[in-house]
């Protein structure tokens, strides 16, 4: 089991940037597939990006391709989500999730461990 803590959310204007962090403890994050999900009020949780283990192949949902970048720092046991050119529709609570390598993808129930989430609000 791995414990996950997200940070880096906040209020940003459209076109701005944020970098979310997902810090892990209790286990080595490099052994897990990691996914970033978001949930806006009244909407289902949706997958945003994920990174495979151990080879670090990355995937993005179409709406964030070219704007978001997921990366992993194995020394710091942390996964990041760099978000650029933010839009109001990117707003929501962002969660990171970890699971066995077979979890890779945007199906939330495949992941076994979740952080508490961090709020991202994109508004002028």
Image (spheres, rainbow, N blue to C red):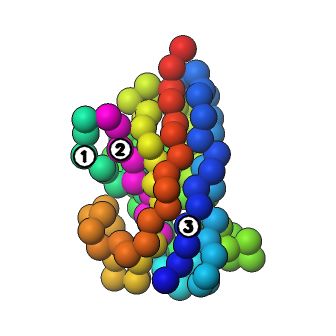
Residue 44: which numbered mark, if any? Answer: 1
- Tell me residue 25's x, y (percent): 63, 76
Disc 1: CA contacts within 10 A as few (<14), some (14-19) or many (>=20): few
Question: Can you see residue 2?
Answer: yes
SS class, disc 1: loop
Q: Earlier in the sequence, mark 1 or mark 2?
A: 2
Callouts 1 and 2 close, C-beta under 8 Å:
yes
The residue under label 2 is 39
Which residue is situated farthest in the top direction here?
Answer: 124
The magenta segment is: 34-41
The residue lying at 51 percent from left, 26 percent from top is: 122
Q: Secondary structure at mark 3?
A: strand
Q: Position of residue 88 (x, y in %)?
A: 43, 25
In the displayed structure, would residue 103 be above or below residue 39? below
Query: For the point 59% across and 41% down, which residue is it?
Result: 9
- Residue 5 image position (x, y, % from top left): 59, 61
Residue 55 visible to the viewer:
no
Q: Is residue 48 magenta?
A: no
> In the rendered view, would you say 88 is above or below 17?
above
Residue sitting at x 68%, y 70% = 73
Q: Is residue 39 magenta?
A: yes
């Amino acid at each position: 089991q791995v414990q996950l803590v997200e940070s880096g959310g906040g209020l940003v204007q459209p076109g701005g940037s944020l970098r979310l962090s997902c810090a892990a403890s209790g286990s080595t994050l490099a052994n897990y597939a990691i996914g970033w999900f978001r949930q806006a009020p009244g909407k289902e949780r949706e997958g945003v990006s994920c990174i495979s283990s151990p080879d670090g192949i990355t995937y993005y949902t179409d709406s964030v391709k070219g704007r978001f970048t997921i990366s992993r720092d194995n020394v710091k046991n942390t996964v990041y989500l760099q978000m650029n050119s933010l839009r109001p529709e990117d707003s929501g609570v962002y969660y990171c999730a970890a699971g066995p390598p077979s979890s890779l993808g945007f199906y939330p129930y495949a992941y076994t461990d979740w952080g508490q989430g961090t709020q991202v609000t994109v508004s002028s």
